[in-house]
Image (spheres, grey):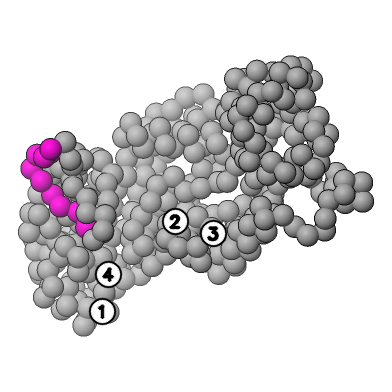
Amino acid sequence: MIKITMKERDSGQRLDKYLKKYLSKATSGFLYKMLRKKNITLNGTKATGSEILRPEDEITLFLSDETILKFGGIIPERDKDASQTGKSEEPSREEQKQERRCRQYAQAYEANKGIEIVFENEHILVADKPAGMLTQKASPEDLSLNEWFVGYLMATGKISREELHTFRPSVCNRLDRNTSGLVLCGKTLAGSQKISALLKERSLRKFYCLYVKGMITEESQIEGFLKKDRQANRVELCKEAKDEEGSYIKTVYKPLKNYRNMTLLEAELVTGKTHQIRIHLASIGHPVLGDYKYGHFEFNDRYKKKYGIDTQLLHASRLEFPKLEGEWEELSELVLTAGMPEIFRTLDEGER
C-alpha cells in the first residue's frame, strides 16, 4: 500500500487521468475495477475516477509494490524494501528512462545557469531564451530550454523525481532556435492550462523587436493565410485559404527607429504561427535582417561580413497579460520585458 498526497502542480485534473499517468501501463478496465473494489480510494472513501483532484487530496493504492511497479508506478524511497517485496536491485526500464531524463535536466541547467528568469510565481515561469538554443528538443540528445527549465526546478527543490512521474513541467510556447526572448513555462498543471487558454483566445499579447530591410515610417498590419511545408520547414503566404488548407495570420507592426537602409520594428503577433513575422514582412519587401530562408541575400550578406550576423535578428521582447481575477490576479495586466541582445545594441551604435 502507498499513499499519494496531491500537490498544487497536479491538482485540477480528474482522478482517473492522474491514475493513468501514475500507472501508465495499466488498462482503463483495471483502474476502474480497482476503484470499484476500493483497492484505490480518494480521501479514504470509494471514488469513481471522475473526481477533480485538489491540493492535499490523498489517494491510497491498496496494491502490492510488485503490482505498482509492474504497471509503471513508483514506490517512494521511504517505502522501498527489496527484501520484503522481492524486487530485484536491477532498476526497471521505466526507472532507467527516468534516470536518463534527470541527468539531461541536470546537464541542461548546469550548462545554462546564465539564463535570466524574468518572472516566476507558484504556477508559471517566464525565461529569456538566448538565440541558438532550442525551445524543445528536436532529437533525444538535445538539451533545450525545456530541459533547462525542469533542471532548474529540480535543482532548487521545487519538484522531485517522484513528482515528475505524474506531471512534467514544460514550456507553453515556442520560439525558433535562433529567435531570442521571452518563453512562458508552466510549473503546475493549472499554470500550463491557463497559459494555453490565454494563447488560444489571443488575449495574451506578444511583441517582437527586429531589424528589417528598407525604410518603414508608418504603423500598419498584414493579414493572410499560411500554408506549411513540413518537409522543407518552410511556409507559404496565401491571400486566401485554398482547399481548406492554410491558417489565418495577422501581424501588426510599427517602426521604432530608421537607419540608412533598414528599420528597427516592433511587431505584434496577433496570431502565432510558424515563421509568421518572417514571411509576412518578406511579402511586403521588408525581410528580416539575417533571415536567409525568406530574406534578401545581398542585404544579409553585407551585415554578415560587417557584424557576423548569420541568422534572423528576431527578439521576443514583451508580453502583456489581460485583466485577470481570482487566483490569477497576480498576472492581471502584467507587462514583462526582455532586454535587447548585445547584437541589437551593436547594430544600433554601428549604423547611426
Q: Residue beneath label 2, please?
A: 136
Q: Who comes first in sequence, dot 1 or dot 3?
A: 3
Q: CA distance from mark 2 to mark 1?
A: 28 Å
For badge 2, the amino acid type reads Gln
Of residue 280 and residue 236, the one placed in the foreground of this image is 236
Look at the numbered disc 3 and give the secondary structure of its residue: helix
Q: Where is residue 183 drawn, in percent x and y?
A: 42, 51
Residue shown at 69% from the left, 41% from the top: 71
Q: Which badge, 3 or 2, is on the more N-terminal residue?
A: 2
N-term mark: 2 or 4: 2
Which residue is nearer to you in this view: 218 or 178? 178
Q: Amino acid at mark 1?
A: Tyr
Q: Secondary structure at mark 1?
A: helix
Image quarter of residue 250:
top left
Report which residue position mark 4 lands on: 311
- Three-letter amino acid code at the position of disc 4: Thr
- Asked if residue 124 is positioned above or below residue 285 in the image, the reply reads above
- Residue drawn at the location 80% of the way across and 33% of the way down: 63
Would you say the residues marked 3 and 2 are in contact, meaning their CB atoms lie under 8 Å apart?
no
- Residue 307 bears which disc, if any? 1
Disc 4 and disc 3 in contact, CB within 8 angstroms: no
Label 1, label 3: how far apart the Cα atoms are: 29 Å
- Residue range highlighted in magenta: 234-243
Q: Residues within 10 Å of mark 2 (few under 14, many from 20)?
A: many
